[in-house]
Image (cartoon, rainbow, N blue to C red):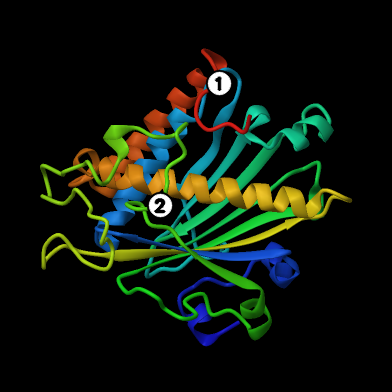
């Protein structure tokens, strides 16, 4: 562990010790035309809204716990008061078909535990059925500078495994199943901030000299140990991760007039309301959101 990692309060948890054992380590870099402070609100708002879009017909997201971190807990940092969330993802139609065919009944649930100590965040995904044979660990840092060489303080061994992938919310192709003109940054103009539409030159060139810019550095460490199909499933997972990150960050930008100016307390109130709505949505209606046909 580096001195920087210790100083910012992000000590590795026990589940993170074998990160080097991950079969895949992918660092996604996502530039956005907003500030780091703005993204704190935009990301939380986007998660709440996107959760509703992915919930219905017995599937989707169940919020088990959402509370402030307290002293003595992992990742607690008095300089950056954090929030702990525990969610269960009821998946079924949202996982690759090859897994649906092989997985026993009741095994298609993903547990998410997250420590949001913004501007640093950590999220862990696990599955009871897979136990130690599966995990996804996400370390996220939010910076106002691009192309930072080793923002996650990785070891030499981890750096050898790391694959850097850049996501451009303006120019990368959008899956036709996901496209909405209201969520297209090349069509959207913000009435509140005056930002957008984004040009094909984004992020190299800004639409104005005072347009802010930040980067989400999201490090995914993935392990899926299942005889014969392990590497196939890992690749499918990462394909869907890129799709999810691309869609989500397009939404965050295109929803800016909805969340710009909100406070953290406004977000907490929204999250509490969303938790109740998710419980109702999961019990009724049809399956919604991204699926893997």
Q: Which of the pair 148/139 is nearer the observer?
A: 148
- x and y, in percent, of residue 123 in the image: 56, 55
- How far apart are the alpha carbons under marks 1 and 2? 27 Å
- x and y, in percent, of residue 49 in the image: 38, 34
The residue singled out by tag 1 in the image is 287
Residues marked 1 and 2 touching at CB (< 8 Å): no
Which image quarter holds the C terminus?
top right
- Which residue is painted at 64% across and 85% down in the image? 156
Q: Which of the pair 225/276 is nearer the observer?
A: 225
Q: Which of the pair 43/79 is nearer the observer?
A: 43
- Which residue is painted at 37% across and 70% down in the image? 79
- x and y, in percent, of residue 154 in the image: 58, 79
Which image quarter holds the N terminus?
bottom right
Between tags 1 and 2, which lies in front? 2
- Which residue is painted at 11% across and 66% down in the image? 210
Q: Residues within 10 Å of mark 1 (few under 14, many from 20)?
A: many
Q: Is residue 123 above or below residue 74?
A: above
* Element type where label 1 sits in the image: loop
* Element type where label 2 sits in the image: loop
Q: Residues within 10 Å of mark 2 (few under 14, many from 20)?
A: few
The residue singled out by tag 2 in the image is 172
- Which residue is painted at 81% across and 41% down in the image? 129
Q: Quadrant of residue 104?
A: top right
Q: Quadrant of residue 251?
A: top left
Q: Give the side of residue 135 with respect to residue 94, left or right.
A: right
């Amino acid at each position: 562990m580096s001195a920087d990692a210790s100083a910012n309060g992000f000590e590795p948890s026990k589940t993170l010790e074998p990160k080097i054992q991950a079969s895949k380590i992918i660092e996604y870099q996502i530039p956005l035309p907003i500030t780091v402070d703005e993204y704190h609100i935009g990301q939380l708002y986007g998660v709440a809204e996107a959760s509703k879009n992915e919930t219905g017909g017995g599937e989707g997201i169940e919020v088990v716990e959402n509370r402030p971190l307290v002293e003595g807990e992992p990742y607690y940092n008095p300089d950056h008061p954090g929030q702990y969330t525990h969610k269960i993802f009821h998946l079924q139609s949202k996982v690759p078909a090859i897994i649906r065919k092989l997985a026993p009944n009741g095994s298609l649930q993903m547990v998410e535990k997250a420590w949001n100590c913004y501007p640093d965040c950590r999220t862990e995904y696990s599955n009871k059925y897979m136990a130690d044979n599966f995990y996804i660990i996400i370390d996220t840092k939010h910076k106002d500078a691009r192309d930072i060489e080793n923002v996650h303080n990785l070891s030499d061994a981890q750096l050898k495994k790391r694959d850097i992938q850049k996501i451009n919310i303006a120019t990368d192709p959008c899956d036709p199943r996901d496209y909405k003109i209201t969520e297209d940054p090349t069509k959207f103009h913000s009435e509140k901030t005056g930002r957008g539409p984004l040009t094909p030159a984004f992020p190299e060139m800004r639409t104005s000299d005072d347009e802010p810019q930040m980067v989400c550095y999201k490090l995914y460490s993935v392990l899926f140990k299942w005889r014969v199909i392990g590497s196939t499933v890992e690749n499918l997972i990462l394909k869907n991760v890129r799709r999810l990150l691309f869609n989500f960050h397009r939404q965050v930008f295109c929803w800016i007039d909805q969340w710009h100016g909100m406070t953290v307390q406004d977000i907490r109130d929204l999250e509490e309301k969303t938790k109740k709505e998710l419980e109702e949505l999961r019990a009724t209606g049809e399956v919604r959101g991204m699926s893997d046909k």
